Image (spheres, helix red, strand yellow):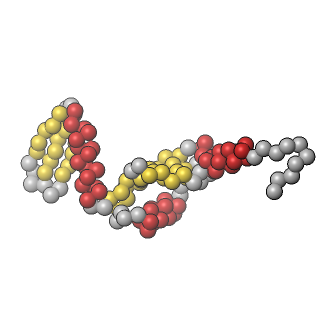
Amino acid sequence: MKIILSPSKGKHRLTLEGGDELLFPKETDQVFTYFIDRVKEYKKIGTAYVTSAMELTPQQKQAVEQKLLDTTKYVQFEIHYTTDPALIGGMVIRIRDRVVDGSVRTRLEHLTRDLERIQLKVGECAP
C-alpha cells in the first residue's frame, strides 16, 4: 500500500494507492507523525540528525551514511544535515533518543572540567 500525505486547506489529504482519498483535520498531526514513524521503524528506515561545524561534502555525507548503516539495524536513512560553527569541529549525530557527540566543543568542555578538578598546591607536583 502506498500512502501520500499532503496538506490541503487546513486538513491532511491521505491518498491511498488505489486513488481513494481521505481528509483529516490538521489536529491529527501527532497521530500521523506517530504512524509514519512506526512504518519507518518497521521498514528499518532510520532518521538521523547530523550537525557539523561546517558544510559536509557529498563524499563526507556518503561516508557518514555508510557508517550509520554499518553500525545500526537500519537498512536506509533519512539524514537531516545542519551546520553549527560553535561546534568548532567534528559533529553531533542524533538518532531517536541516542546522541553521539564528537564535537571539538564538547571535548574542550570535558577537558576544561577535568582540569578544574585537578587542584595542586603551590610547589606540589602532579603524580
Can residue 48 be seen here? yes
On the picture, is 37 further left or further right than 97? left
x then y, percent, for residue 89:
62, 51
Q: Which one is in front, 23 or 74?
A: 74
- What residue is at 65 percent from the left and 45 percent from the top? 109
In the orientation shown, which residue stands out farthest toward the right?
Answer: 123
x then y, percent, for residue 28:
21, 37
x then y, percent, for residue 23:
13, 38
- What residue is at 78 percent from the left and 44 percent from the top? 119
x then y, percent, for residue 96:
39, 50
Task: Count how many numbered circles sit on residues in the image.
Answer: 0
Which image quarter is the C terminus in? bottom right
Q: Which one is in front, 107 or 121?
A: 121
- What residue is at 68 percent from the left and 44 percent from the top? 113
- Residue 105 versus residue 2 in the image, above or below: above
- Residue 12 versus residue 76 in the image, above or below: above
Q: Which one is in front, 7 or 28?
A: 28
- Residue 58 versus residue 54 in the image, above or below: below
- What residue is at 13 percent from the left and 55 percent from the top? 17
